[in-house]
Amino acid sequence: MAFKVGLLGLGTVGAGTVDILRDPFQRHPLLQELVIHKVGVRSLDKPRSVDLPLNLLTTDLDAIVSDPEIDIIVEVIGGLEPARSLMLKAIAHKKHVVTANKAAIARFGEEIFSAAAEAGVYVLLEAAVGGGIPVIEPLKQSLCANRIRTVMGIVNGTTNYILTRMQAEGGDFAEILADAQQLGYAEADPTADVDGFDAADKIAILASLAFGGRIKLAEVYCEGIRQVNATDIAYAEKLGFVIKLLAIAKRDSATDPEQLQLRVHPTLVPKAHPLASVNDVYNAILIEGDPIGQVMFFGRGAGAGPTASAVVSDILNIAALLKVGRGQVTQADGTPLLDPLLACSHQHYCTIAPLEDLITRFYARFLTQDYPGVIGKLGTCFGNHEVSLESVVQTGIRDGSAEIVVVTHDVREGNFRQALDEIKAMTTVASVASVLRVL
Ligand code: HSE
């Protein structure tokens, strides 16, 4: 039996997928039953490194998604359009879809999964989060007996590379970003990565699976790493932390267990925490559930081979269903029957807790006049807003001002922000140089 695959896109991930599909030796035997039927590309003239007969290539992507011979469409062109329209068209033609497209899934998940449920096809997306790291299938299947409390991770390799170098070299963000761009570790337009949007897409997808509800992407709080600087990294280091861009989805049991915290921001992570030692371009996702406790997934979050590994695992999952006749099953009343562990089954939207109700620790750095009583005033102001301080450090003078670094205990974000507004208005305070959350 042969299962025909239509590939949309022959960039890095597409080429990696072709490499695996055309070299099944010592891999799962089911791979030998997969056939690349057509590959959609933007230009037929571009030189290609992949081992692929040229007659498989076409620029007519619409013809691929409506080709009656094709069973599985693999969308690895990325971006929002035409990826969304092509996936919807493939679904309408009753084709199963495998995608690596976190941006399209995070924005159009409802539309895509509703269409798939109606058509009785699967849309699988292991490669959309964490590249080669298996985390989607574990959340759907291996961990499904658990009540998930937290999904927290480093899901963007570019920012992890930049922060790791800032930590190691003591450099500032702008210079290390420029160097990372030169070396090809960061995109020429780094916005999606450094402003946290890529991580927000990914945590929205993970949260949806972990907590069994849809997520409105606009409700994910998102702060990138542009404001992280060498001074804060050095202070964090002295205080026993490293700074990481964390994506966090958490059941907000402190306030309302029905609400989720959903946020992406640079975070001071204690050096002993499992995520603190995830460096360079590596990704890791830490999941906490009941009864499993903690489980962490670690690996390469991008790149041709790792991402293609995830894409091909999804293709094989679908091929396995097709092989045993479970690809498209219709019930007596004519409605499609899908495997509930593989298909998306949730309909409602999760409720996201307001950020001001978040309970967390904070790190803040102030530049103040060097007068007696300034630290006392800061402490009194925080105390008035029920913000308890864990440590206060004044190590020296910067730009003619005293530099004071404060770490709080767990406090309500709204209270902390109110105290901060009052502190900003103090004549003795030159500036609030930085504010970061602490894990
Ligand atoms: N741009 C992403 C990253 C890789 O830097 O991790 C693809 O998801």
Image (cartoon, rainbow, N blue to C red):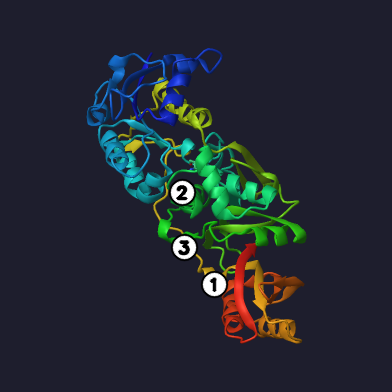
Q: Quadrant of residue 436?
A: bottom right
Question: Quick one: SS at disc 1?
Answer: helix
Does mark 3's beta carbon lie closer than 8 Å to ligand 1?
no
Q: Looking at the picture, how far across and down is residue 143, in whole percent?
A: 59, 42
Q: Nearer the viewer, residue 400 or 383?
A: 400
Q: Say whether disc 2 or disc 3 marks the residue closer to the N-terminus.
A: 2
Question: Quick one: SS at disc 2?
Answer: loop
Q: Name the kind of residue labelled 1 in the image.
A: Glu
Q: Nearer the viewer, residue 35 or 92?
A: 35
Q: Say whether disc 1 or disc 2 marks the residue closer to the N-terminus.
A: 2
Residue on which the image places disc 3: 351
Q: The N terminus lies in which quarter of the figure? A: top left
Q: Nearer the viewer, mark 3 or mark 1?
A: 1
Q: Looking at the picture, how far across and down is residue 303, in whole percent?
A: 51, 33
Q: Looking at the picture, how far across and down is residue 367, in whole percent?
A: 65, 75
Q: The C terminus lies in which quarter of the figure? A: bottom right
Q: Is residue 225 left or right of residue 351?
A: right
Residue on which the image places disc 2: 190
Structural distance between the alpha carbons of marks 1 and 2: 29 Å
Q: Name the kind of residue labelled 3 in the image.
A: Thr
Residue on which the image places disc 1: 356
Q: Is residue 265 left or right of residue 10?
A: right
Q: Are marks 1 and 2 in contact (CB under 8 Å)?
A: no
Q: Looking at the picture, how far across and down is residue 285, in whole percent?
A: 60, 45
Q: Name the kind of residue labelled 2 in the image.
A: Pro
